[in-house]
Amino acid sequence: MVRYLLGELSAEERENIEQQYFQNDTLFQELLHVESDLVYDYVNGELSPEQRTKFESQILSTAQGRRKVESSRALLDSMSENAAEVSEVEKIPWWQSFGFHRWMQPGAWQSATVILLLVIGGGWLGVENIRLRSQLGTLTTSVQQNEQEVRRLQVQVATAQHQREQEETAWSSSIVKLNEELQRARADREQAEEVARDKESQLRQSLRQSPSERESATAIATYILPFNSIRGTSEQTEPLTLSEEHKAVRFQIDLGRTAFRAFHVSLQTVDGSEIWKAVKEARRTRTGNSITVNLPATVFTQQHYILVLTPSGANSQAESFAEYSFRVVRKD
């Protein structure tokens, strides 16, 4: 603390001590006591020449420091005078031993009053300085805590906003997926109902037919091609199986809901060779539109085929509406 008061510490060391006594009143009180001892040693001439020079450049450079030195010097002078009077107490009457005659001298009361005011003023300034430093330390701590709280709240708000955006994105994606799955399930159900109705109708029609007509009906192989909602070639997993009993092949193609009324239908091999083509009208069903194509069974050999549908009236460069790839298995 003496080195701090005499200005012998580095800037970092001074800042460290100031932060400590700003937050610790006991440490600040101790620093004031050390400063008072330095002032006393300076007034009594007990400092070394180097310390005296530093004392004058640090403490005497401020008005408060000069007041403390003057107050201490005046107090020491008064104590010296009292000590001199005590040594002469046996030489004066007893009623003068208490120094009443000095206080009755002109100007004595004024000097005592000034000294008393200086002592009281210095003490009040010290107490006020301690109080202000304590308030400043409290305010500084409060401001720092408020800034930390504001930063913490800002981080929480940003985190909550980011989480909400992620949740909204996930919810939107889930809703879209659910809608797509619902549409696919509805289309599959309607298609299954349509196929069931067709089979039921065929069964009833078969029951009404004569044996010869039934034999003719069984000679037709029915191959159902479901609606393809994705552009491109749809490869069928189940092959078209033909035997020697099959005289014809009936393709039932589900087109979904479309505004096209007719389509160019082309049967091709995988190398692009066209085997058969025709224009077919689309018929309306409960699930949308469909096309029925009948071909002789002799057209097919055991290989892969592609059935291409292009809207009627489109040029040769137009994009196909649907393409179905399937495999033919012969059991002749």
Image (cartoon, rainbow, N blue to C red):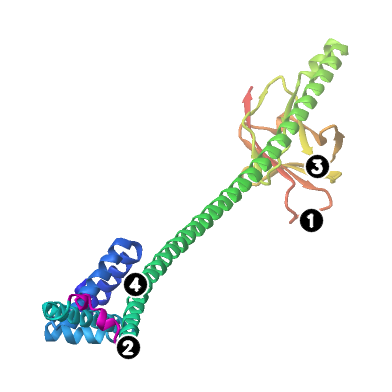
The quadrant the C terminus occupies is top right
| Earlier-in-chain disc, 4 versus 3 | 4
Q: Residue 1: horizontal and vertical position, in percent?
A: 22, 71
Q: Mark 4 sits on what residue?
A: 123
Q: What stretch is highlighted in magenta?
A: 94-105
Tag shown at residue 107: 2
Report the amino acid beneath label 4. Answer: Gly
Left or right side of 308 for 285: right
| Earlier-in-chain disc, 3 versus 1 | 3
Q: Which of marks 4 and 3 is in front?
A: 4
**SS assignment at label 3:** strand
In which quarter of the view is residue 105 placed? Answer: bottom left
**SS assignment at label 2:** loop
| Earlier-in-chain disc, 1 versus 2 | 2
Q: Mark 3 sits on what residue?
A: 278
Do the residues under discs 4 and 3 have CB atoms within 8 angstroms? no
Left or right side of 93 for 147: right
Write the residue at 68% across / 36% down. Answer: 181
In space, the residues marked 2 and 4 are separated at their CA atoms by 25 Å
In space, the residues marked 3 and 1 are separated at their CA atoms by 15 Å
Q: Residue 61: horizontal and vertical position, in percent?
A: 29, 87
In space, the residues marked 3 and 2 are separated at their CA atoms by 138 Å
Write the residue at 31% across / 70% down. Answer: 18
| Earlier-in-chain disc, 2 versus 4 | 2
